[in-house]
Image (cartoon, grey):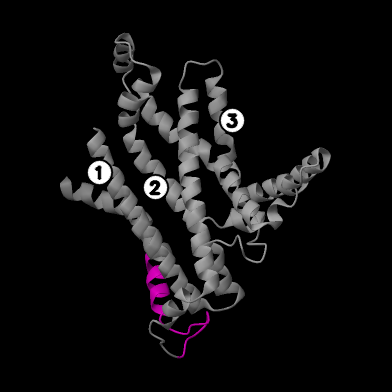
Amino acid sequence: MLKARSKAYWLFLAPALLGLLLVVIVPMLLGLFYSFTNWNGLFFSKTVGFSNYVAAFHDSGFMNAFWFTVRYAIVVIIAVNVIGLGLALLVTQKLKGSNILRTVFFMPNLIGGLILGFIWQFIFVRVFAAIGTALHLTALTGWLSNPQTGFWGLVILTIWQMSGYIMLIYIAYLEAIPQEILEAAEIDGTTPWQRFRYITFPMVAPAFTVSLFLTLSNSFKIYDQNLSLTNGGPYLSTQMLSMNIVRTAFTNNKLAYGEAKGIIFFLVVAAISLLQVYFSRKREAQLS
């Protein structure tokens, strides 16, 4: 019986494992190998050692994209989690129409990244410009033609898209809190802030681990919104890491060099994600 169950288990698991092997593991290993060569997408004539990696760290465009992505990720991670938690606290109150609000807040996440970028491009270019012209506010004109406002345009787009999704994660943990504990604390005379700080916040700590991981990985991997909203402009000042890697490999036809950048990108995101999960778990243990 155990052997039969074991065979059935591996039989059902085999398609997923095969897909993982062919789509993720094999391409990653091949990419790692090609990053040490002068591969152009069709063939390679020699190995070049770590020269592609050294060149990446001396590439000003790659380093500018890296630091731009880091700044963007920090702002987005904080903003999305704060707003997502705030929305979750709002819709878990006994308010009329809270279910409708949940749907409304989550709906932006259903829109594809490219379409979302074009929608917000229209808002920033046409709507903001029209309002700025009508009210004589020059700050609202040319949002995507300026590196600073282009940065905030990407941030606003991501917050609008992801906050509703992160809200659902916090809702799941908020609704799992026993109401008896909150009611007992209220009877004891605690304020809403005290109940949130000493009861709600520690009990939703696991949600922070999940939400921080999702927002962190998504912030570093963003590509389609960056492509459709700013296309890296003006003068590549809003180009993010993913776009820089894609352009290196497929626009400049330097696939081995692009592979090296991709491996660096993977290692950085993996290291940051693992550290985030480790410290978040440690913080959970302290709060529990």
* Quadrant of the snapshot with the N terminus: top left
| Furthest residue toward right | 134
Q: Which residue is mark 3?
A: 104
The residue drawn where x is 40% and y is 87% is 47
Q: Which residue is mark 2?
A: 213
Residue type highlighted by circle 3:
Val
Marks 2 and 3, how far apart at CA: 24 Å
**38 drawn magenta:** yes
- Percent across and percent down for residue 215 are 45, 47
Other residues around mark 3 within 10 Å, as few (<14) / some (14–19) / many (≥20): few
- What segment carries the magenta color? 25-45
- Percent across and percent down for residue 271 are 34, 59
Q: Which residue is mark 1?
A: 282
Residue type highlighted by circle 2:
Phe
- Percent across and percent down for residue 281 are 27, 43
**114 drawn magenta:** no
Between 234 and 85, the residue placed more toward the observer is 234
Pair 2/1: label in front: 1
* Quadrant of the snapshot with the C terminus: top left
Residue type highlighted by circle 1:
Lys
Between 89 and 143, the residue placed more toward the observer is 143
Q: Secondary structure at mark 2?
A: helix
